[in-house]
């Protein structure tokens, strides 16, 4: 069977991501399982949870990033949320008492940063509001809950985060212009 | 004296106005320096009016706007070089054909149809569900005219002019106003399309010599919708080259209104009657050969005489699909070392034949034709069983049951947030996806075109990508050429060699074309 070539000579593939993923997948699983096993065997604090979460962060942010909605706002908010979860885990499993302070500082910093990300490339980034809305909602809810349940006086960062996240939500709604209903329907449709 | 002064004054005024006009044109375009291509200044003046008109019609970003204006300039230059009179060139490139697409902000969106919902979950970094439709013209493609054809055509297909986005519960298609690009073909067909970035397009238009190809992420459309887009694009391309045609046989008028039926999710309009089944099945035997890293690693087209193929199938008492399936089973048997287990070949079923519809979205289901390896020896012996299974499994009732199952699953998980749904759906797809099939045969059937266009096209082909199946087959017939395409995921040539031998044995002796093999 003689095949007449009717396609251009294929260029060498530039991306080696699939090879990296293939190799890294096994390494990551092995590391995670080893950590868990050693932690269980050695006892003590559950440090392996932090290692496993960190591995997941590296995996989802660097090795195998999102294939849909890969934009600066979504990646930034994802990194911030995952980092905050990591800090909370460290607080819970290793040393406690500082996470609410640090996380709220990170959150309000990130809220300002995400607004900068939006307004420095407004035309393109205005299509990527959902991660921003979800991040603001999460910050708002967390700070409100913290203010309600806290028995002591809440540190200044928490109400600032609360106000700021509310302000960012307003920014998002303003960015939607006159299409708020349609935009929200698009983001939260169930069919 | 007075007359001379009047003439001089008139000339001065004309010169000033001309200079003013030139300055205005340059200032208004604010970037691309358009050199008007015609030798006659009067012709260039006419062309300048077009560019002046364009600035009101395009409100994209500066870079996109300039690129679009340059597309017009390049097309105009092509016409000037080809000796097309300016009036005719300007009529063909009439800016009215842009409609309001580039001047209105995008605020529409499309929820995914029920068949498309799985595709974002089945994506991998090196694989996504992509299919490709190509048409081979009788002349080489003119890239600048093809670009203009796409610029004019895209507005008629609003669900194609979209970017895939994540909602809180489901993915969706967000309307994206941009300049959609045509590219020279440079690699192997059906490679993943990068759909992640803001404003990414979910389809690609390629040209290579006399071939125009469109590759679609399956989330947008199925073969029928994809073929409609390709036909319309070609019709517009040929119109720009001076070949007028009627808008029938699946060619849509580019300036026509989009009907709601064209963007409908028809799965929701099927009444739930009868049982719900059809997705779960056991794993099938895969053809042999190590999976290549680049998939597909080769594409092969068997081009045959359509009338002869139909006659051979009729002689064996089979449809063309059943006949090709019988060859695939035997060729697959020769391409594996397994001696037991079952082959299961997926056959997509166009739901439009049961529920007539104009939709350009996905409206297909599939069935699996399953045969134990021990029974596979000669193609002719398999035909009765294949025909029986095709009749039974591709029936309206069986398809309804499958649609019911799909609708029920979709309904059951509709309120689960996407970040929870996605990992589970990926795992489920791993079990229920391609593993239950050994291969695929998708037959688009006979493609018809208006006669003015049909006379300019030699043949067509259709290529399907798959992930773990070693070979996927697809078929389309245009004119008297039936093209059976095989996309390979392994370097082992046993399957296609066996297929070729079987076709030759039946006297069909195909012309074999394809891409170079990419070895790991």
Image (cartoon, coloured by chain):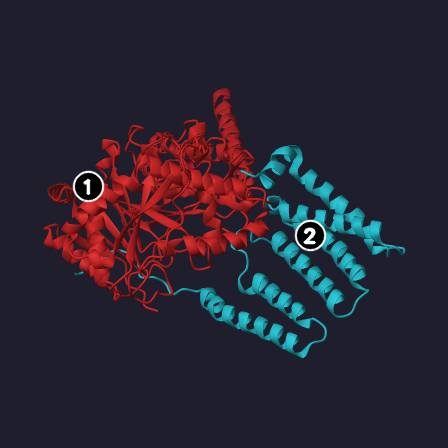
Chain colours: A cyan, B red
Q: Position of residue B428 (x, y in %)?
A: 47, 53
Q: Which label lies toward us, 1 or 2?
A: 1
- How many marks the image carries: the answer is 2
B376 or B59, nearer to the observer: B376
B443 or B330, nearer to the observer: B330
Residue at mark 1: chain: B
Q: Position of residue A186 (x, y in %)?
A: 58, 38
Residue A93 vs residue A17: left or right? right
Residue at mark 2: chain: A
Residue B341 vs residue A188: left or right? left
Q: Position of residue B181 (x, y in %)?
A: 43, 46
Q: Position of residue A113 (x, y in %)?
A: 71, 54
Q: How crowded is the residue under tag 1: few (<14 C-alpha within 10 Å), some, or many (20+)?
A: some
Q: Which residue is mark 1?
A: B319
- Residue located 40% across and 36% down the image: B360
In this view of the protein, can residue B359 be seen by the observer? yes
In this view of the protein, can residue B38 be seen by the observer? no
Q: How crowded is the residue under tag 2: few (<14 C-alpha within 10 Å), some, or many (20+)?
A: many
Labels 1 and 2 touching (C-beta < 8 A): no
B255 or B367, nearer to the observer: B367
Q: Going by the picture, which residue comes out furthest to the right?
A: A153
Q: CA distance from mark 1 to mark 2?
A: 59 Å
Quadrant that contains the C terminus of chain B: bottom left
Q: Going by the picture, which residue comes out furthest to the front?
A: B275
Q: Going by the picture, which residue comes out furthest to the bottom?
A: A42
Q: Which residue is mark 2?
A: A114
Looking at the rendered structure, which numbered label has been put on residue B309?
A: none
Q: Secondary structure at mark 1?
A: loop
Q: Secondary structure at mark 2?
A: helix
- Residue located 29% across and 34% down the image: B242
Dot 1 and dot 2 within a common chain: no
């Amino acid at each position: 069977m003689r095949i007449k070539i009717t396609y251009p000579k294929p260029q060498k593939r530039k991306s080696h991501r699939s090879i990296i993923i293939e190799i890294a997948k096994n390494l990551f699983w092995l590391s995670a399982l080893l950590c868990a096993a050693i932690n269980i065997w050695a006892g003590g604090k559950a440090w392996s949870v932090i290692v496993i979460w960190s591995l997941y962060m590296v995996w989802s942010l660097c090795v195998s990033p999102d294939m849909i909605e890969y934009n600066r706002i979504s990646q930034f908010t994802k990194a911030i949320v995952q980092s905050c979860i990591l800090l909370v885990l460290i607080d819970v499993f290793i040393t406690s008492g500082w996470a609410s302070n640090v996380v709220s500082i990170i959150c309000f910093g990130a809220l300002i940063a995400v607004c900068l990300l939006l307004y420095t490339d407004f035309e393109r980034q205005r299509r990527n509001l959902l991660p921003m809305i979800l991040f603001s909602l999460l910050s708002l809810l967390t700070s409100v809950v913290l203010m309600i349940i806290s028995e002591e006086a809440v540190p200044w960062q928490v109400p600032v985060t609360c106000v700021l996240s509310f302000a960012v939500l307003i920014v998002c709604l303003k960015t939607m212009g006159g299409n708020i209903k349609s935009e929200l329907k698009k983001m939260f449709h169930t069919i | 004296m007075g007359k001379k002064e009047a003439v001089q004054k008139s000339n001065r005024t004309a010169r000033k106005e001309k200079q003013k006009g030139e300055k205005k044109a340059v200032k208004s375009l604010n970037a691309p320096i358009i050199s008007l291509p015609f030798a006659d200044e009067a012709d260039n003046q006419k062309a300048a009016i077009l560019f002046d008109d364009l600035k009101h019609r395009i409100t994209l970003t500066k870079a996109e706007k300039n690129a679009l204006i340059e597309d017009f300039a390049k097309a105009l230059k092509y016409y000037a070089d080809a000796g097309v009179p300016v009036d005719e060139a300007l009529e063909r490139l009439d800016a009215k054909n842009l409609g309001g697409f580039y001047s209105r902000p995008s605020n529409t969106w499309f929820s995914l149809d029920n068949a498309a919902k799985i595709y974002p979950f089945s994506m991998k970094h090196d694989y996504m569900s992509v299919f490709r439709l190509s048409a081979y013209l009788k002349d080489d493609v003119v890239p600048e005219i093809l670009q203009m054809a796409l610029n004019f055509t895209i507005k008629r297909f609003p669900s194609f002019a979209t970017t895939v986005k994540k909602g809180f519960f489901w993915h969706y298609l967000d309307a994206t106003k941009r300049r959609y690009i045509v590219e020279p073909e440079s690699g192997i067909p059906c490679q993943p399309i990068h759909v992640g970035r803001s404003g990414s397009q979910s389809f690609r238009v390629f040209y290579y010599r006399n071939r125009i190809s469109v590759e679609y992420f399956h989330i947008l459309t199925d073969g029928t919708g994809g073929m409609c887009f390709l036909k319309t694009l070609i019709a517009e391309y040929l119109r720009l080259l001076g070949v007028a045609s009627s808008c029938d046989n699946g060619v849509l008028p580019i300036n026509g209104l989009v009907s709601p039926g064209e963007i409908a999710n028809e799965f929701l309009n099927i009444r739930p009657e009868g049982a719900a089944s059809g997705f779960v099945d056991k794993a099938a035997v895969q053809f042999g050969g190590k999976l290549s890293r680049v998939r597909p690693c080769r594409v092969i087209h068997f081009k045959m005489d359509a009338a002869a193929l139909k006659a051979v199938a009729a002689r064996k008492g089979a449809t063309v699909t059943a006949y090709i399936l019988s060859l695939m089973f035997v060729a697959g048997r020769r391409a594996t070392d397994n001696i037991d287990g079952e082959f299961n070949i997926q056959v997509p079923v166009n739901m439009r034949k049961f529920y007539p519809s104009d939709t350009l979205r996905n409206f297909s289901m599939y069935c699996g034709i399953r045969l134990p390896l021990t029974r596979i020896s000669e193609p002719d012996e398999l035909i009765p069983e294949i025909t029986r299974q095709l009749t039974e499994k591709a029936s309206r009732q069986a398809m309804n049951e499958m649609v019911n199952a799909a609708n029920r699953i979709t309904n059951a998980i509709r309120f689960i947030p996407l970040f929870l749904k996605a990992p589970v759906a990926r795992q489920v797809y791993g079990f229920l996806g391609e593993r239950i099939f050994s291969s695929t045969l998708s037959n688009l059937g006979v493609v018809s075109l208006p006669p003015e266009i049909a006379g300019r096209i030699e043949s067509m082909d259709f290529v399907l990508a798959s992930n773990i199946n070693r070979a996927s087959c697809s078929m389309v017939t245009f004119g008297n050429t039936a093209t059976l395409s095989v996309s390979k995921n392994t370097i082992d040539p046993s399957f296609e060699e066996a297929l070729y031998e079987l076709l030759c044995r039946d006297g069909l002796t195909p012309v074999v074309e394809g891409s170079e093999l990419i070895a790991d």
